């Protein structure tokens, strides 16, 4: 099996597991009802390691899975995660990722980007989501939560051989 | 010609894939979000409006922060007064506990039924929305167990029964509930003390708070903080007299003809573990006129018998 296909399949499985965790046991550690978005951190990690193709395809597949599971209209999460996967994949191999600061910075930016995209998509398509209204409250809790967890999750994912850094051409 | 196309796709593999995936997502969105009718002017307005709301919210936040400092001083004075009241309340609470204990004993002696109506479906909460953008709750019963869309959902917490929301979608073995605090959830309600009617709407932006709207401004002086808000039964979806929450803040905006009342739900959604779906048969029939006495009877679940397995969130 092609390396990229193998990585994409592994990433989709990892993202699906994260989404299931978010909907179940992560509720126990929610702060004011806000849970960390582990799937977003995984997507950022994989896209930065393996490039746009793997990032966007895995983001799309995981987004569809999330849309099927949740009340969001089909296409909502897939569009958001496809774009985030693609954008982060552009920088694959060009950014030095230290163990602590860069995972935090990359994840914080991704979470704000997610808030922006969700707001724009909700506004255009008239979707009444209860989430990041006018960029206050819940978004910033998630930004902080994801930022704190990112270095640990990056370190954990770095142990898996399948997510090893791509060559420059993969970016 | 096909060679030229393949060459283009080969050279721009990532770009073509991105375009296809975005197009697929947009098609899915258009198909699944039936309410939308794309009109360029409305799309533009929504797009710009999103950023306008963002700016207004951001500046409002700075304004609120400055206001909070002023409020802090006022709160310090109120705290002293509240402390004195608290001591008085503490004494009253001890009396109530003793009265409850006596009440339970007397009920036992009179052999009152200690069960729920049989036509309620008890369910366990098994999941929530995976993202923080939406707020549905998934339960472990579906159409096979008789669950139907639109069924009212209640839960017991502490000593009270409170409305959780309604069933949104039903699968064979699981269903999704739209909670009270979701912005798409509307419940016709009334203040239990003054009998003023309004509409409770989920706010969504802050966890667990709902807004009671369309209560006439003349009722402002009669409404007290902590007053109970119950379902009014209008519209037919939710039965009359289910507890919704307690008044937390009353706003009389100059540009509005009615009050905006912030209500803290009875149910703490963070601690929701078990819920009960109400069948039409289990809906209490209240045909008494709207008098305070009648309402007290229809909305007094504090003294209503509770099921044995109702750890429903009481501190779990």
Image: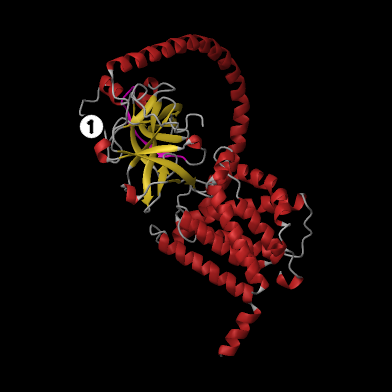
Residue A95 in which image quadrant: bottom right
Magenta stretch encompasses residue B200: yes
Can residue B56 be seen by looking at this rendering? no
Q: Nearer the viewer, residue A125 or B18?
A: B18
- In the rendering, at what x and y percent does residue B87 appear? 52, 10
- In the rendering, at what x and y percent does residue B89 appear? 48, 12
Disc 1 element = loop
Q: Residues within 10 Å of mark 1 (few under 14, many from 20)?
A: few
Magenta stretch encompasses residue A103: no
- In the rendering, at what x and y percent does residue B58 appear? 60, 42
Judge whether A155 appears above or below B115 on screen. below
Chain of the residue displaying label 1: B
Question: What residue does disc 1 label?
Answer: B285
Can residue B110 be seen by looking at this rendering? yes
- In the rendering, at what x and y percent does residue B136 appear? 45, 46
The region drawn magenta spans B193-203
Judge whether A115 appears above or below B119 on screen. below
Left or right: A126, with B108 as reference point: right
Left or right: B50, with B188 as reference point: right
Left or right: B182, with B147 as reference point: right
Q: Nearer the viewer, residue B294 or B188?
A: B294
Left or right: B291, with B207 as reference point: left
Task: Please name the residue shown 76% across and 70% down the image.
Answer: A168
Task: Please name the residue shown 51% across and 29% down the image.
Answer: B315
Task: Please name the residue shown 38% across and 25% down the image.
Answer: B228
* Circle count: 1
């Amino acid at each position: 099996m092609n390396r990229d296909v193998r990585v994409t399949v592994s990433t989709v499985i990892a993202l699906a597991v994260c989404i299931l965790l978010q909907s179940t046991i992560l509720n126990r550690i929610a702060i004011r009802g806000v849970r960390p978005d582990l799937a977003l951190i995984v997507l950022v990690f994989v896209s930065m390691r393996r490039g746009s193709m793997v990032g966007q395809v895995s983001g799309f597949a995981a987004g569809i899975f999330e849309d099927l599971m949740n009340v969001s209209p089909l296409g909502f999460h897939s569009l958001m995660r496809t774009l985030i996967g693609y954008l982060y994949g552009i920088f694959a191999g060009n950014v030095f990722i230290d163990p602590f600061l860069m995972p935090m910075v990359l994840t914080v930016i991704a979470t704000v980007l997610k808030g922006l995209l969700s707001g724009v998509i909700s506004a255009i398509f008239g979707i009444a989501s209860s989430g990041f209204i006018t960029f206050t409250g819940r978004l910033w809790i998630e930004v902080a939560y994801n930022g704190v967890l990112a270095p640990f999750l990056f370190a954990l994912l770095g142990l898996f051989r399948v997510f090893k850094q791509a060559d420059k051409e993969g970016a | 010609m096909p060679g030229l196309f393949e060459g283009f796709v080969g050279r721009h593999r990532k770009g073509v894939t991105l375009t296809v995936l975005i197009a697929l997502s947009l098609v899915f969105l258009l198909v699944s979000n039936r309410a939308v009718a794309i009109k360029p002017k409305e799309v533009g307005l929504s797009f710009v409006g999103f950023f306008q709301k963002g700016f207004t919210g951001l500046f409002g936040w700075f304004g609120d922060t400055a206001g909070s400092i002023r409020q802090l001083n006022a709160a310090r004075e109120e705290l002293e007064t509240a402390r004195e009241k608290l001591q008085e309340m503490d004494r009253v609470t001890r009396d109530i506990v003793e009265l409850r204990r006596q009440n339970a004993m007397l009920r036992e002696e009179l052999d009152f039924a200690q069960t729920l109506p049989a036509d309620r479906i008890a369910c366990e909460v098994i999941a929530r929305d995976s993202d923080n953008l939406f707020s549905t709750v998934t339960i472990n019963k579906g159409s096979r167990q008789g669950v139907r869309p639109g069924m009212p959902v209640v839960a017991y917490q502490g000593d009270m029964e409170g409305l959780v929301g309604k069933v949104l979608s039903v699968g064979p073995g699981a269903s999704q509930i739209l909670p009270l605090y979701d912005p798409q959830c509307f419940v016709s309600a009334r203040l239990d003390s003054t009998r003023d009617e309004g509409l409770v709407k989920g706010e969504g932006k802050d966890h667990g708070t709902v807004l009671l709207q369309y209560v006439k401004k003349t009722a402002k002086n009669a409404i007290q903080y902590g007053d109970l808000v119950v379902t009014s039964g209008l519209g037919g979806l939710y039965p009359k007299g289910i507890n919704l929450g307690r008044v937390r803040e009353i706003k009389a905006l100059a540009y509005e003809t009615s009050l905006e009342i912030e209500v803290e739900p009875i149910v703490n959604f963070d601690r929701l573990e078990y819920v009960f779906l109400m069948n039409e048969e289990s809906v209490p029939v209240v045909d008494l006129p709207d008098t305070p006495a009648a309402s007290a009877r229809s909305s007094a679940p504090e003294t209503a018998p509770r099921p044995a397995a109702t750890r429903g969130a009481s501190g779990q």
